[in-house]
Image: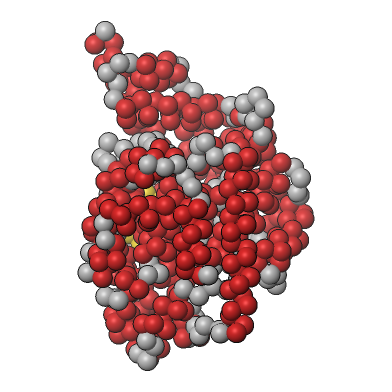
């Protein structure tokens, strides 16, 4: 019996090594495509990406794998991590094998090239040029959902399960309705208050040398706890995080000469993701459980960006350093004025530039649009018009261009339908963790002392080390004793903005 289990473990280990090698190669293609690759490379590189993707699918189709996964789950002396890996591998196997080979390869090639097409369309403010690409991606994803759906499962739920298992459209409808009921009245109140007492923020939109911004943001990421001995900070059109393993974590930001806060908070956000990846246990990294589930991942980036990064205690020890970096622009700007500016709330057009209060309204717009797109109730042809309508309804603003409207996010160009709700779920989880952590450790005292390591250490012990072996509900119940409850997020917003 022991000999048989050893053989099963060997087969499982060999599979995991090959799976990781192929996934690493695909990750490197993704990284290069969004950071350094020239525009002309897109079409040829996409073919190589398609071949690698086909090899990845074929790996999961090899004979005997299903039995190996089943026996790894059933064996009495399998570790909890081995069982979790076997479950995750089996889920990935079912997903991949439900899709015909030629269609899977075609989709991989399509999305490998579509990111640069999206980027070009955004720069040229031309949704019409990208719409046929998006239509093809959507058509293929709808077809894949029909292959993958279990009996009675709606197509959008198929995609939601890829990002944060257990959160269905039905649950999210209730979740977002609760957020709307709590946030919309607050936004109206803030808009009225802004008319009576506007917050001064013009100093954030002067001319800021981008090279100085690069030096400052690299220092800031390291201050937060991102280890540059095990990671890099690069630039991309849309900031993102990826990793090969916990010792090679890659984050990006985007610099605007006339907007200081954009790169600062993008860097803090992505550093939060990166610190999570670097905090994975050695047994988790370089496996299918590396990183974390998407909602949990977003909870960490939003925790660093907002709960920590917009607080007075965070900025008191370091604001002087920012002033010295940009003395001409900030020398006469007090910390109080700076904090009011970075915590102001004003409905705007761009999700990544939005404040804490209005952020989830941006997510609700995308959620309502993409579930209708996937369900066939909304066509790509009408998407831009509907985007404008919902922005006017929820935020009171209307995009004048496609770049600040329907083309602002890369997710749909990558085929990632169902990801956007993770941001809102992450906000809610971050607030719930923040309340609990303040009972356990004095966050304000640690921030004032510049002791970010103690905060990251707590999160590493309770969240980061598990990677994706535990989902949002399991982690929250273990850490806080409760499942996800948006009341903490709404109370946080009311305390801050009411």
Residue 408 place in picture, x, y as percent: 60, 63
Front-most of residues 306 and 328: 306
Front-most of residues 403 and 187: 187
Q: How many marks?
A: 0
The residue at the point 32 percent across, 70 percent down is 314
The residue at the point 24 percent across, 64 percent down is 446
Residue 106 in sight here: no
In which quadrant of the rendered image does the N terminus lie?
A: top left
Front-most of residues 442 and 454: 442
Q: Quadrant of residue 382?
A: bottom right
Residue 89 in sight here: yes
Figure check: 53 above or below 207: above
Front-most of residues 396 and 117: 396
Figure check: 281 above or below 448: above
The residue at the point 56 percent across, 49 percent down is 421
Residue 163 place in picture, x, y as percent: 51, 42
> Is 385 situated left or right of 366 in this image?
right
Figure check: 468 above or below 370: above
> Is 185 situated left or right of 285 in this image?
right
Residue 119 place in picture, x, y as percent: 58, 61
């Amino acid at each position: 019996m022991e000999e048989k289990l050893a053989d099963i473990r060997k087969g499982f280990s060999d599979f995991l090594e090959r799976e990781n090698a192929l996934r690493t190669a695909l990750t490197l293609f993704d990284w290069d495509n969004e950071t350094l690759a020239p525009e002309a490379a897109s079409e040829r590189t996409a073919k190589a990406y398609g071949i690698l993707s086909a090899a990845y699918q074929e790996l999961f189709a090899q004979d005997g794998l299903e039995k190996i996964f089943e026996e790894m789950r059933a064996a009495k002396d399998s570790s909890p991590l081995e069982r979790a890996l076997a479950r995750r591998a089996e889920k990935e196997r079912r997903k991949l094998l439900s899709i015909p080979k030629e269609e899977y390869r075609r989709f991989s090639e399509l999305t490998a090239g579509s990111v640069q097409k999206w980027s070009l369309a955004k720069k040229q403010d031309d949704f019409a040029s990208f719409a046929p690409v998006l239509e093809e991606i959507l058509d293929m994803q709808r077809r894949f959902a029909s292959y993958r759906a279990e009996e009675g499962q709606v197509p959008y739920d198929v995609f939601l399960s890829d990002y944060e298992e257990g959160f269905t459209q039905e649950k999210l409808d209730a979740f977002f309705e609760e957020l709307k009921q709590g946030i919309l009245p607050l936004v109206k109140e803030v808009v009225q208050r802004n008319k009576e007492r506007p917050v001064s923020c013009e100093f954030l939109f002067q001319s800021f040398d981008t090279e100085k911004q690069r030096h400052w943001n690299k220092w800031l990421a390291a201050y937060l706890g991102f280890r540059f001995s095990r990671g890099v900070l690069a630039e991309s059109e849309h900031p993102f995080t990826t990793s090969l393993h916990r010792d090679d974590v890659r984050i990006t930001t985007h610099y605007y000469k006339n907007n200081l806060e954009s790169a600062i908070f993008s860097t803090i956000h992505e550093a939060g993701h990166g610190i999570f990846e670097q905090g994975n246990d050695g047994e988790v990294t370089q496996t299918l459980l590396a990183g974390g589930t998407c909602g949990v991942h977003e909870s960490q980036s939003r925790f660093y960006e907002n709960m920590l990064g917009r607080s007075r205690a965070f900025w008191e020890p370091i604001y002087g350093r920012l002033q010295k970096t940009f003395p001409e622009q900030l020398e006469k700007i007090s910390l109080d004025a700076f904090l009011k500016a970075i915590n102001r709330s004003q409905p705007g057009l761009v999700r990544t530039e939005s404040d804490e209060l209005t952020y989830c309204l941006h997510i609700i717009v995308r959620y309502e649009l993409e579930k209708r797109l996937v369900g066939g109730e909304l066509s790509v042809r009408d998407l831009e018009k509907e985007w404008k309508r919902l922005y006017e309804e929820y935020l009171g603003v209307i995009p004048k261009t496609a770049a600040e409207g329907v083309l602002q996010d890369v997710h749909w160009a990558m085929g990632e339908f169902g990801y956007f709700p993770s941001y809102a779920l992450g906000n809610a989880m971050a607030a719930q963790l923040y309340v609990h952590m303040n009972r356990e450790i004095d966050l304000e005292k640690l921030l004032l002392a510049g002791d970010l390591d103690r905060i990251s250490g707590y999160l590493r012990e309770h969240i980061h080390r598990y990677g994706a072996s535990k989902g949002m509900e399991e982690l929250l119940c273990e850490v806080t004793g409760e499942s996800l409850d948006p009341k903490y997020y709404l109370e946080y917003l009311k305390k801050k903005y009411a």
